[in-house]
Structure formats: C-alpha cells, structure tokens
Image (cartoon, rainbow, N blue to C red):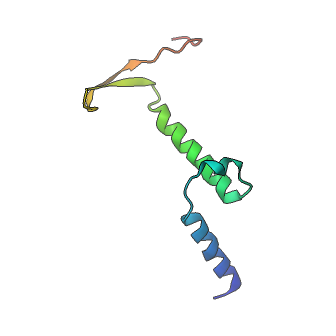
C-alpha cells in the first residue's frame, strides 16, 4: 500500500471515529472544528422545527394530539 493511500485511510478513520465534544469549539484541529460546526447546524435545524413556527399540541403522555399548531408570537415582526 502506498504512503498516500495509507494516509487517506488513517484520516478517514480519524474522522469516522470522531464524536462531538464541547471542547471542539475551541480546538485548533480542523476535524474538531468541522464537527463543532456540523453539530451546531444540526441542532439549530432540529430545535427550530417547522418553517411556519407553530407548536404542536401534545397530550400528557407526550403523544401528538393536534398538528394544526399554535402560532408563536413574533414580537417586532409584522404578523
């Protein structure tokens, strides 16, 4: 196996074994920084929810009761 292929495989293993750590935000390592950015983008997308910004109604057991949603008031924006 040539040197370039071996380095590529080692780099792929490093990235493949990587999981997010809060210290990644302050790391100088490119892989750590990439993981931090990807984690932030994924959590932003997950927590923002739907584009209409409506809240679904859930029952006591956490199951969906109504998906019509309740509008979120957006202060400072025209409704």
Kindly identify the residue that appears in the image at 64 percent across and 81 percent down: 6
Task: Point out the residue furthest to the right here.
Answer: 28
Kindly identify the residue that appears in the image at 71 percent across and 53 percent down: 27
Q: In this image, 54 relative to 24: left or right?
A: left
Kindly identify the residue that appears in the image at 39 percent across and 24 percent down: 55
Q: In this image, 28 relative to 17: left or right?
A: right
Kindly identify the residue that appears in the image at 67 percent across and 52 percent down: 33
Q: In this image, 55 relative to 29: left or right?
A: left
Residue 79 spot, x, y in % from top left: 51, 11
Q: Quadrant location of residue 66? A: top left
Residue 52 spot, x, y in % from top left: 45, 25
Front residue (pair 3, 24): 24
Q: In this image, 48 relative to 6: left or right?
A: left
Task: Point out the residue furthest to the bottom here.
Answer: 1
Placement of 24 over or under 58, stated as above or below: below
Residue 29 spot, x, y in % from top left: 71, 58
Q: Quadrant of the N terminus?
A: bottom right
Placement of 61 over or under 3, stated as above or below: above
Front residue (pair 65, 59): 59
Placement of 79 over or under 45, stated as above or below: above
Residue 11 spot, x, y in % from top left: 64, 70
Q: Give the total number of marks visible in the rendering.
A: 0
């Amino acid at each position: 196996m040539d040197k370039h292929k071996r380095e590529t495989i080692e780099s792929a293993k490093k990235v493949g074994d990587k999981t997010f750590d809060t210290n990644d935000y302050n790391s100088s390592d490119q892989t750590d920084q990439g993981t931090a950015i990807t984690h932030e983008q994924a959590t932003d997308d997950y927590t923002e929810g739907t584009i209409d910004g409506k809240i679904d109604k859930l029952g006591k057991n956490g199951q969906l009761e109504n998906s019509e949603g309740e509008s979120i008031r957006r202060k400072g924006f025209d409704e």
